[in-house]
C-alpha cells in the first residue's frame, strides 16, 4: 500500500473533538476504497489539517474525504521514507 499525506484548509478554530469527529467519518467508510486513515493533525491557528493514509491511489483517498464531507485537492504520495 502506498502512503499519502493530504492537507485541508479552512479548519480555523476547530477543536480536537471536532477533528476526531471528522477523522471518524473517514474511518467509517475507508474500507469501501481500500484506504486506511492512520492519523490526523490540526494546526488550529492556520486552519490546516494533515491526514496520513495508506491506500491504493490518490483518487481513492480523495473519494473517501469527499464522501466524509471534507474534500481536498492537496494529496501527496509519500514515495520516499527515512527513519
Image (tube, rainbow, N blue to C red):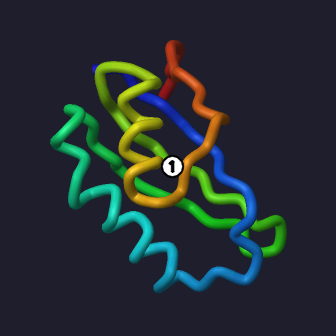
Please provide percent x and percent y for residue 64.
36, 44
Between 78 and 13, the residue placed more toward the observer is 13
Q: Residue at x 53, y 14 (%)?
A: 80
Please provide percent x and percent y for residue 63.
40, 38
The residue furthest right is: 46
Q: Is residue 15 left or right of residue 28?
A: right
SS for dot 1:
strand
Between 39 and 8, the residue placed more toward the observer is 8
Q: Quadrant of residue 23?
A: bottom left
- Figure disc tally: 1
Q: Is residue 40 left or right of residue 38?
A: right
Please provide percent x and percent y for residue 29.
23, 52
Which of the image's four quarters has the N terminus?
Answer: top left
For mark 1, does the 10 Å Cα neighbourhood hold few (<14), some (14 to 19), or many (20 or more) residues?
some
Q: Residue at x 34, y 32 (%)?
A: 54
Please provide percent x and percent y for residue 79.
50, 14
Report which residue position mark 1 lands on: 51
Q: Residue at x 47, y 36 (%)?
A: 62
Q: Residue at x 20, y 32 (%)?
A: 34
On screen, 39 above or below 56?
below
Amino acid at each position: 500500500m502506498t502512503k499519502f499525506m493530504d492537507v485541508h484548509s479552512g479548519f480555523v478554530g476547530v477543536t480536537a473533538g471536532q477533528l476526531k469527529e471528522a477523522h471518524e467519518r473517514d474511518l467509517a467508510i475507508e474500507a469501501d476504497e481500500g484506504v486506511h486513515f492512520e492519523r490526523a493533525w490540526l494546526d488550529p491557528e492556520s486552519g490546516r489539517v494533515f491526514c496520513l493514509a495508506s491506500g491504493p491511489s490518490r483518487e481513492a483517498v480523495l473519494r473517501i474525504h469527499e464522501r466524509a464531507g471534507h474534500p481536498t485537492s492537496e494529496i501527496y504520495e509519500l514515495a520516499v521514507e527515512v527513519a
